[in-house]
Amino acid sequence: MEVGEVNHQPAGNYYKELCVVCEKNKAQGIHLYTSFICSECEREMISTETNDPKYRYYLKQLRKAAEPQILS
């Protein structure tokens, strides 16, 4: 039995979520607790040095992920 090549063409409509860091709707990323972090912000945070002014911004935005959410 031969297995053909799988074509991985992206579908036209992705499910998008609001990134807790950049506050934009993005299709790809990770979940941290109940919060979503897009792939772009994840890469930027990982490569940011602690003495960079952006580092404090990322910390501030990530605090939102630790805030308890009221789910009804």
Image (spheres, rainbow, N blue to C red):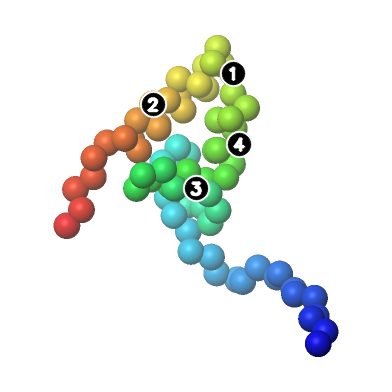
In percent of width and height, residue 69 lies at 23, 45
Left or right of residue 52: residue 32: left
**Rendered residue at 61%/36% (across/down):** 43
- State the separation of the CA atoms marked 3 and 4: 11 Å
Question: Which label belongs to residue 49?
Answer: 1
**Rendered residue at 40%/32% (across/down):** 62
Q: Mark 2 points at which residue?
A: 60
Q: Mark 3 points at which residue?
A: 30
Whether residue 24 is visible to the viewer of this picture, yes or no, is: no
Q: Name the residue at the front extreme.
A: 1
Label located before the other in sequence (1 or 2):
1
* Type of amino acid at the residue the image marks with label 4: Arg
Crowding near the residue tagged with mark 2, few <14, some 14–19, many ≥20 C-alpha atoms within 10 Å:
few
Q: Mark 4 points at which residue?
A: 43
Q: Nearer the viewer, mark 2 or mark 4?
A: 4
Left or right of residue 68: residue 52: right
20 or 65: nearer the viewer: 65
Label located before the other in sequence (3 or 2):
3
- State the separation of the CA atoms marked 2 and 4: 17 Å
Label located before the other in sequence (2 or 4):
4
- State the separation of the CA atoms marked 4 and 1: 12 Å
The answer to whether marks 4 and 1 mark residues whose Cβ atoms lie closer than 8 Å is no
Label located before the other in sequence (3 or 4):
3
The answer to whether marks 3 and 2 mark residues whose Cβ atoms lie closer than 8 Å is no
SS at mark 3 in the image: strand
* Type of amino acid at the residue the image marks with label 1: Glu
- State the separation of the CA atoms marked 3 and 2: 18 Å
The answer to whether marks 3 and 4 mark residues whose Cβ atoms lie closer than 8 Å is no
